[in-house]
Each structure stands twice: as C-alpha cells, then as structure tokens.
Image: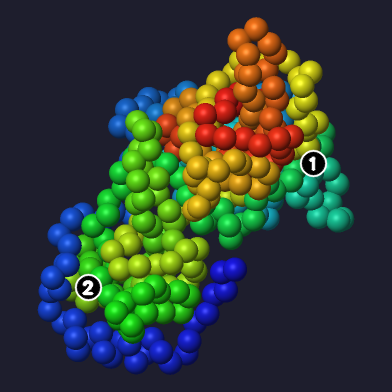
C-alpha cells in the first residue's frame, strides 16, 4: 500500500533544475517560524535528593517487591529505553504508562526512577520471564542497588501477553481531530508540475516554500497533512496524506522526495515534523456483551467517522472513528471502550461492540472499531471498559 521507492537518478536531475529555477524567493516563500520541538519543558521544579526534577516521583521504598527500577541517566529518552529493555522502541508508551508521575513523555530527568514493566510478549526464545534489562543488578524478585548503567533490579513475575491492535504503516496515516496546526510550510510545486500530474505520490520530487532561513535541514523527515473541515467544538479533521524527506535546501526554499503516500498529495498540503507513532499493544480481554456491567468511566460519544467516504453511513469493525475523550480526560493509546446506545429511557443499554484507541489528542482520540455486534453511527455512546 505504501511502497517506498527511491529512484537513483531522478532527484539528481531535479536538484539541478531546482537550483537554477529557485535561486530566489518564491511567491509562496513563508516567513513563519519553524519548530521541530512543539513540546516545551516544564518551567518549575524542585530538588529531590541529589537531582532536580519538575515532577513528584514516588519514593524508593514505595516500589513493590520484584519491581524492576531504572534510574534515568543523562541523554536517556523513553524511545531509547524501550529499545534497550524490549528491543522495540515503539513500546515506549508501556514504560510511560507505568510511570504516570511523568506528565510529558518528551521530558524525563536524570535521577528520577522508572519502573520498567515486564512484557512477556517481547521475550526472546532463550530468555526467561522476568529477566532484567542490560547491566541489571540485584537479586531476582528484589529491588536491587543501582548498577553502573543505572539499572536497579530484576523483574519479577511474567507480564501479560500483549497484541498489536493496528499495522505500523497504517497508524502513521490515521486521520485525527485536533486544534489548528501551523500550515505555513507547504508544497508549492512538483517536479512534473501539478498541471500535468494532479497528485504526487511515492518517489516524486516536490518543492517546498521554506528553507535555510526557517531552519529546514537536508535529511529531515516530515508528515504531509491536509486540513479538511471543522468538527463541532473539537477542532479540525486533519488527514495525513504522506511523508517526505528533505533532499536539498536553499535560502528560502527546499527540495524533497515523497517517501510514503496515504492519500493524494496535492499542491498546498502542509508539513509538520515527523515523530514515529507507536502501535498500542493491549492484553487479551473477554469481549463485552449485553450483560457486561456499565463502568460509568470516561463517558463520551463517537463524534465523526474518519473514513474518507463514510461520514454519513453506518460503521462497523475495522472502521476508524473519533471520540470526544482525549488526553485531557486521561485517555491513553491502547484504552478499550465499550460502544452502546439507549433505545429507550427505561430499557437497559444495547451493547454495540468495542473500539481501541490508537492516538490521543487534547480533546479527542482516534480509535479503531475492533468488534461490532451490529451497526454503529455517529452519536453512539462510549465508556472506558
């Protein structure tokens, strides 16, 4: 669906044309700021023992017996720690979810403790459940002293078996509803011109309206996006149409190659910095049924279909939707919701199925309908399972 093609000669030729044609400022040359770090560090904090932190980490004695605890080191990221402990950087949300005192996953601080949850699904064939990460120290089943690499013990009992709920390539293309994004960094032309080919696709060369003066650098990767329409008071429906890589940069313009296409990529589509979206892993759970008690937690509703041509139709298993529960409500990727409706005010609810959250945004979440007993429509109710 999204083959990645990199012609060996086309972009070299296009680069020469680009340098000749685009030496000066284009009509669409943007002057707005470009930032690859939209998340800002906390501004206040305090000292705990020998280190500074903006958070309130748990005391060491509060960790349960058998917990595997790691002390954050300089230059650590949750992405790198997931690679070190699980051999898969996309599992960083599992570490974050086990350490919810960290309010922003982009900012972790040396000296703070991290509980490293045990995930059996990631064990190698010759590795025992509960095995520690690299350079682990301490007796099995105990919280040990910190080792040279900052690891403080070996995990205890085996964790749950986890399953991915979506495909890695597909989750990068999932639409979402959120607040406005900076749309100033845009595609203004293609190598073959949009008059000849109405849409660009994988392997095509495109010209962008920002360059060195805006901080654009060769080798950077970006999502390509298109703002579609306003959705109530929740924000804008935004489609991710593909990804590109910067090949060369001029003072006020840049040349890039399309590396992935989710939908038609058109003139005027805008770019935001690429940040990999991990596929949530969830443990197996028995499906809901008509006798499953209501939880009353995170009550909300389906606010939109995210399928390109399905906004007015009925929905079922495999469809993407947006719900009005998001990051502000404590929802995280992998959360499972029951979908239901009331057909009569005095009758029990009718259970329609389940959905799993793929990505979260301040007011909304993008979710996949994983099971349906019957059709669903916009406005059907959801609650955290």
Say left or right for 255 vs 337. Answer: left
Q: Is residue 239 above or below residue 236?
A: below
Task: Find residue 96 and report its horizontal and vertical position in percent.
Answer: 56, 37
Q: Check disc 2: other Cα within 10 Å, few if <14, some if 14-19, many if 20+.
A: many
Badge 2 marks a residue whose secondary structure is loop
Which residue is drawn at the image coordinates 45% and 74% (left, top)?
201
Q: Please identify the quadrant where the N terminus is shown.
A: bottom right
Left or right side of 163 for 60 = left
- Which mark is drawn over residue 161? 1
Indicate the secondary structure of the residue bearing disc 1: loop
> Which quadrant of the figure has residue 357?
top right
Give 374 or 21, whichever is nearer the viewer. 374
At x 27%, y 51%, the residue is 182
Task: Please name the residue that numbered disc 2 is placed on.
Answer: 253
Nearest to N terminus: mark 1 or mark 2: 1
Residue 380, position in %: x, y?
Answer: 57, 28
Q: Residue at x 66, y 37 (%)?
A: 375
Figure check: 257 above or below 81: below
From the viewer's side, name the closer residue of 219 and 357.
357
Question: Residue 300 at what x, y percent from top left?
Answer: 52, 24
Q: Place residue 17 in its image quadrant.
A: bottom left
Tell which of 89 and 293 is nearer to you. 293
Give the CA separation, mark 1 to mark 2: 49 Å
Q: Residue furthest top?
A: 346
> Which image quadrant for residue 291?
top right
């Amino acid at each position: 669906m999204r083959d990645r093609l990199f012609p060996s000669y086309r972009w070299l030729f296009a680069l020469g044309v680009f340098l000749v044609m685009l030496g000066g400022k284009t009509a669409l040359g943007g002057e707005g700021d470009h930032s690859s770090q939209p998340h800002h560090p906390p501004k206040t904090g305090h000292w705990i023992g020998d280190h500074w932190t903006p958070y309130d980490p748990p005391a060491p004695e509060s960790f349960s017996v058998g917990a595997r605890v790691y002390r954050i080191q300089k230059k650590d990221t949750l992405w790198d720690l997931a690679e070190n402990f699980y051999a898969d950087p996309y599992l960083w949300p599992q570490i974050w979810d086990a350490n919810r005192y960290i309010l922003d996953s982009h900012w972790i601080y040396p000296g703070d403790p991290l509980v490293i949850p045990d995930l059996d699904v990631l064990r190698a064939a010759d590795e025992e459940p509960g095995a520690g990460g690299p350079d682990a120290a301490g007796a099995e089943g105990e919280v040990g002293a910190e080792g040279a690499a900052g690891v403080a013990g070996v995990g205890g009992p085996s964790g749950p078996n986890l399953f991915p709920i979506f495909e890695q390539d597909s989750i990068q293309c999932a639409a979402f509803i959120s607040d406005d994004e900076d749309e100033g960094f845009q595609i203004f032309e293609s190598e073959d011109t949009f008059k000849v080919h109405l849409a660009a696709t994988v392997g095509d060369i495109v010209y962008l309206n920002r360059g060195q003066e805006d901080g654009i650098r060769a080798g950077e990767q970006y999502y390509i996006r298109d703002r579609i329409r306003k959705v109530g008071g929740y924000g804008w429906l935004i489609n991710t149409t593909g990804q590109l890589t910067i090949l060369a940069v001029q003072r006020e313009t840049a040349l890039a190659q399309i590396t992935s296409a989710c939908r038609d990529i058109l003139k005027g589509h805008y770019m935001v910095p690429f940040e990999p979206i991990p596929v949530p892993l969830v443990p197996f759970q028995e499906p809901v049924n008509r006798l499953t008690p209501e939880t009353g937690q995170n009550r909300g509703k389906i606010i939109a279909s995210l399928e390109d041509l399905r906004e007015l139709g009925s929905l079922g298993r495999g469809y993407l939707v947006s719900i009005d529960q998001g990051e502000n409500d404590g929802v995280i990727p992998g959360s499972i919701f029951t979908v239901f409706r009331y057909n009569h005010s005095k009758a029990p609810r009718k259970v329609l199925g389940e959905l799993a959250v793929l990505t979260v945004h301040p007011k909304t979440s993008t979710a996949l309908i994983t099971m349906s007993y019957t059709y669903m429509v916009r406005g059907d109710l959801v609650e955290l399972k």
